[in-house]
Amino acid sequence: MVLLDTITIEVNKLNVSIIGENGDLASALNKKLMTDHNVSCYGKDNYNFLNKDKIIALADKIYNSDIIVSCSGVATSDDSWDMFTINSIAPIFLLEKLIEKKSQAHVIIIGSHGAMWTSWPGISYMRLAYNVSKETIQSFTKGLSQANISSLKLSIFNPSSFQSNLNGYRGYPIDIIVNGIIHVIQSPVPLLVYEYNNHQDANR
């Protein structure tokens, strides 16, 4: 009788930081990753994207991460100042602070397919502001990657509407989006812009 040795395959555990702890996407992503990786989540008490000092403190906590996923953002607001600050300016400022700390993380910013198609007849003012704010962070991140002035690895993940509290749980099942993000994490050479959209829908 031949005895076969048991082969144990160890998963390479990554240190993952997820920003946006209180959101549906961050929560679902955390649950999917926590089994195989060391995951830390940061909520508004830790990062408040309307407060520069909080962003600096957040950068100090996460710059040594292997993976940083920024799920924070606002889709519904009556204030375009907050819309652009949270969706564009704050993530840009966070990237600046990570570069100052010489971070080598793979930063994945969750954008929106609205960045690819910002306007249409009859669009509301705030929806236009949202789309352009997402277009702004996408453009900056692409430019930063092409500039090759840091050790950060950068990706933008642009999903269409997915089931979350932000949109009344309409759209794609959230697990599809989570699996897409994990694909970006696991890819040896991840795309700079990863777009998930299989249909055109002005109400997305």
Image: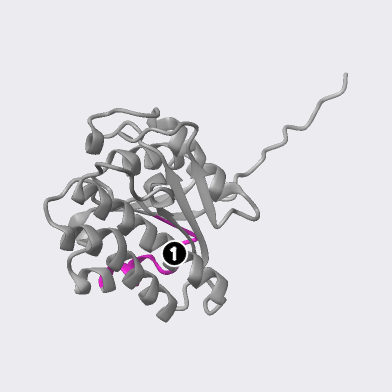
Tag 1's secondary structure? helix
- Give how far across and how far down residue 50 sits, in percent: 18, 65
Q: Is residue 30 left or right of residue 176?
A: left
State the residue at coordinates (23%, 45%).
22
| Image: magenta residue range | 57-69
Magenta region includes residue 79: no
> Could you say which quadrant of the image residue 146 lies in?
bottom right
> Could you say which quadrant of the image residue 9 lies in?
top right
78 up-or-down from 170: above or below:
below
Q: Which residue is mark 1?
A: 139
- Give how far across and how far down residue 134 sits, in percent: 35, 55
- Give how far across and how far down residue 67 sits, in percent: 47, 57
Q: Is residue 53 left or right of residue 144?
A: left
**Where does the C terminus fall, quadrant-wise?**
top left
Q: Is residue 29 visible?
A: yes
State the residue at coordinates (39%, 27%).
173
Q: What residue type is disc 1 on?
A: Ser
Residue reaching furthest right?
1
**Where does the N terminus fall, quadrant-wise?**
top right
Residue reaching furthest left?
78
Q: Is residue 36 visible?
A: no
The one nearer the camera, 151 or 45, is 151
State the residue at coordinates (38%, 32%).
201
